[in-house]
Image: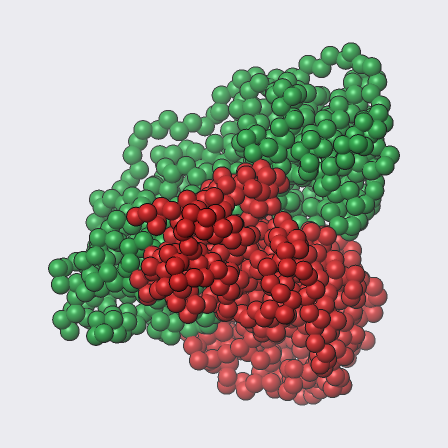
Chain colours: A red, B green
Amino acid sequence: MNSAKLIEGLQYKANKLRIHSIRSTTKAGSGHPTSCLSAADIVSALFFHTMRYDPQTPSNPNNDRFVLSKGHTAPLLYAAYAEAGAIPIAKLDTLREIDSELEGHPTPRFEWTEVATGSLGQGLSIGVGMALNGKYLDKLDYRVYVLMGDGESAEGSVWEAAALAAHYNLDNLVGIVDVNGLGQSQHTMYAFDIESYRKRFETFGWHATGIDGHNMSDILAALDEAKSTADKPTMIVARTLKGKGISFIENKDGWHGKPLPEDDVEAALKELYIPDSDYDFDIESPPKHEVKIKNDSLSQIAPPNYQIGEEVATRNGFGTGLAKLGEVNPLVVSLDGDTKNSTYAQDFMKAHPDRYFECFIAEQNMVGAAVGLSSRGKIPFVSGFAVFLTRAFDHIRMSAISAANIKYVGSHCGISIGQDGPSQMGLEDLAMMRAIPNSVVVYPSDAVSVEKLVEQVANYKGIAYIRTSRPKTPVLYPNNEEFKIGGCKVLRSSDKDQITVVSAGVTVHEALTAYEMLKKEGIHIRIIDAYSVKPIDEETLKKSASQTNNTIICVEDHYYDGGLGDAVLNAMAKHRVLVHKMAVKDVPRSGKPEELMELYGISSGCIVKQVKELTIT
Amino acid sequence: MNSAKLIEGLQYKANKLRIHSIRSTTKAGSGHPTSCLSAADIVSALFFHTMRYDPQTPSNPNNDRFVLSKGHTAPLLYAAYAEAGAIPIAKLDTLREIDSELEGHPTPRFEWTEVATGSLGQGLSIGVGMALNGKYLDKLDYRVYVLMGDGESAEGSVWEAAALAAHYNLDNLVGIVDVNGLGQSQHTMYAFDIESYRKRFETFGWHATGIDGHNMSDILAALDEAKSTADKPTMIVARTLKGKGISFIENKDGWHGKPLPEDDVEAALKELYIPDSDYDFDIESPPKHEVKIKNDSLSQIAPPNYQIGEEVATRNGFGTGLAKLGEVNPLVVSLDGDTKNSTYAQDFMKAHPDRYFECFIAEQNMVGAAVGLSSRGKIPFVSGFAVFLTRAFDHIRMSAISAANIKYVGSHCGISIGQDGPSQMGLEDLAMMRAIPNSVVVYPSDAVSVEKLVEQVANYKGIAYIRTSRPKTPVLYPNNEEFKIGGCKVLRSSDKDQITVVSAGVTVHEALTAYEMLKKEGIHIRIIDAYSVKPIDEETLKKSASQTNNTIICVEDHYYDGGLGDAVLNAMAKHRVLVHKMAVKDVPRSGKPEELMELYGISSGCIVKQVKELTIT
């Protein structure tokens, strides 16, 4: 039983958070104060009673984690950390200013924010990743709290996360839905029907309870109940009022994302009853646990072991390489969505079952969980068909804003998969991954290079993408060949070369065949394997172009816009080089890989034809 | 009560479908026969008893619709239409061949397939769109049947669709989950726990029933029950066996996506007991209803009505234009995900409430529903924050494979939104939409051009994207100015121009300011508003570059890769023109729009600096 004094103290804190939220948003001239007010009591309970964390040491691995899925209530988050002594109260006045880390929606620029939020419906997935790490990897007893809005529960990714959290018995995960009934433009689908939310989470395998989100005793009781619930995650569905505590905005539509006018602030603050309270909060700090898993291994990854000319698909090389990487780097984990026998993530799973997480057919949650794992220092490799990673583009985008350290791996790229048809062909994945700022994008053409590049991207801190292919291709490189991010390989070169052909993945092999065909006719071309699409090796391309009539042909198994060809165009933009792109221009169809390469203009025969057209003129 | 003879006849048909599925996949050398076998009884019941459709006239608007969400069972679909007399049985032998419309996963190349499937978890959303059309727009009494797999129900978009279908009381929608318990790489999350599926759909507001998916009486009874269920959609959860009917593959793991070896086919077919049956199926054809809504309007859309220099955000211009378009084109419908007061889709909603569908915060389902509406002849405008359309990239990609006629509208693009921060800034939307083959991408800079372009994209058959901005910008064009897809506007031009500056949206206004600043210093530049990003006006750009030292500066409010700059690079690739891109290179932050434009290098001041650097050298 919690004392009346505690209750009163927490109510007092809650109204302080409300006051800060109103003041800071009015000062900023924008923001979402009414959404802060509905959640203030819940946040007060979490930050000043339930959560165990050290406000002075956000990096303490044993801190309870808090994920603000309803990121637009950032002012409430900052207010809570200010009241907890993490930052000066005065700092709240810098909300949304260009030189302040207190951004409109939380980003890791604010040290206490471990993950960026603001795209709704992603927080629960991130919480799943943090909870998986605590329960199964670091084996720390921190708990994970995710504060969600009611509107965002319409996002499917919430239900993907709900299913997986129950599947993995994440009893260290607690979700709280702040049901204030009002969305941005109208009432939510269910308004105040708490039971409709509660029952859904219950049928998804959660311990779910409905409460009055402004009743501090109810809130504390529900949070205590969650702590004592074993084997199941807990969802607390809290009925609240948007704008709670201020008569002229409380539960009023049309106030979403609007700060109070300055003239109304004082009247508003008057309404926020603050009882005298000398309650002395002592936030419980966790012991300074060490992270259990460290990467202190000095051993080297085992080298590739192939014969030149051996036929191996790059997706197989990826699986082999990832399993080997797992031997030397205990931080590496693998997630896949029921495609592990196609992407060959199963090789890692078999070698390191404790570090593989099956995410089933739910790519958004898989990426969100990876963000949570990354925030706890792991290096997640997230694999799937390249085409199905597009399902999670918003989550991938947000993972970059979270400054996450995730390696995405897309298999079955391009028309070279053949008969399964266009729905299964990854043809926009390079465009998607290149758009991410500071991303690394590699597209290996053989088993040796993919193994080497798995290690390279693992050592790169940030978002990286490995594109793998379905068909078997001959090994081109010796096992001791080195591949670096930003590099490329000149495979054929002579002083008689008339054109440079830039290729990657399967088209490297088409280009090599074209080379032989043209050589017979006395036409010499330079062949480059541009395995590093981003960053691309501008220097080598420039040098090669200058030696081949400033003319480049770029051939790729990707749609025309956004792929390797555009990477080459950007590298040559200031060098007056002619670039001829060969890529897939229409929605393709089913057929044999070689038939499709021919039909869509990226086969060896098409390269020969293009080279001749350019050399004749 | 259905006669024993009917039951026997349908079982007979089911096994015929099984036989066709096995034969065609073995002949093709790839495909998913075991997934076909689990669903054969359900499909037999639908195609030869329950569904009302005309096999000879797939275009009949009153046909019951069938969506094969588990698209990998395409051979079963083709077999059903063959047995129904729509195509010759012999045609099934062409499965997956390059010149056959019987593709590995269904596409509209096969006339009876209205929408492409194969990316799992999208079919129910498409069904929602078809059902919305039947119940609320065309007011036809066709029913919509969606066949799903169990594995795909892990996809969040299924639950987005489930929620919206119940919200709109779609009692003309029936889903069937084929629970064969086996995914691609292992058991599904719930194996044969039928009740876990049934209860979830029930809590999402559906009439949900669990049956034995191989018991024909049960199947027919459940389908009859669905017909007599009012105000609610029905979900039939059917327990089945993968590979049903053939001992050596039935319910065996490791058989996903594998055809039977030729040597095993005869043994397999022997096991498929086919009772003699002379049952004469007469598939009930619907009356040849006319579509209720036709676009026979000849009236012209009302012209824009602005003053030059008037400050209007392009998102407002979009809302105004869409509402006007709705007056003259009854096929236009609007979908938005609780952002209608930001995108200004609310202007259409207020003018045409019967043609607006609120989709709440669930972008994937919103796009899927639009595909369903498009398949029924409507022209959906799907609006949201540009950044949240990335949530539905996989669905947008599939909408192109479905040859859908959808107009996507993304508001709040770029850093010019200001304080809300990076999670809300659409900075990869151009890369995403340009990657779609044959897409049209427009990015207007003022209210007149956006209104005109709303009409233009509506008249373009296919995928189009309109990018709108949050801040107010001055009207640049007279109300009678014409804008065509593939065009651009030269806003400033003289024979003294030293450089061409290509811009779009907010950067047009930055460029015009830079023009004035430079003019004072005697430096003349050409200013182009490239409102049509795809296709881009190559001729005008080429001509302009040739008159300005073959030098172009391209400035845009988008990430560096995949946007307007790359469109310009592609247009200039063969013309030896120097292209200098100015775009956002890092994850941005919160701040005032003008501060951010300066900080990330796309302001008028930055343009002036870049021009000077290039003109001095």
Which residue is located at x 71 percent, y 38 percent? Answer: B32
The answer to whether B52 appears left or right of A519 in the picture is right
Nearer to the camera, A305 or B278: A305
Residue B11 spot, x, y in % from top left: 80, 23
Which residue is located at x 81 percent, y 45 percent? Answer: B253
Residue B400 spot, x, y in % from top left: 50, 42
Nearer to the camera, A185 or A128: A128
Identify whether B298 is placed above or below B326: above
Quarter of the image that includes the C terminus of chain B: bottom left
Q: Is any part of residue A244 visible from this angle? A: no
Which residue is located at x 41 percent, y 33 percent? Answer: B330
Residue A44 spot, x, y in % from top left: 65, 75
The answer to whether A360 appears left or right of A427 in the picture is right
Quarter of the image that includes the N terminus of chain B: top right
Identify whether A128 is placed above or below B430: below
Which residue is located at x 76 percent, y 32 percent? Answer: B262
Nearer to the camera, A583 or B210: A583
Residue A46 spot, x, y in % from top left: 69, 74
The answer to whether B293 appears left or right of A360 in the picture is left
The answer to whether A504 appears left or right of A10 in the picture is left
Question: How many numbered circles are shown?
Answer: 0
Q: Is any part of residue A316 visible from this angle? A: yes
Identify whether B271 is placed above or below A179: above
Nearer to the camera, A162 or A524: A524
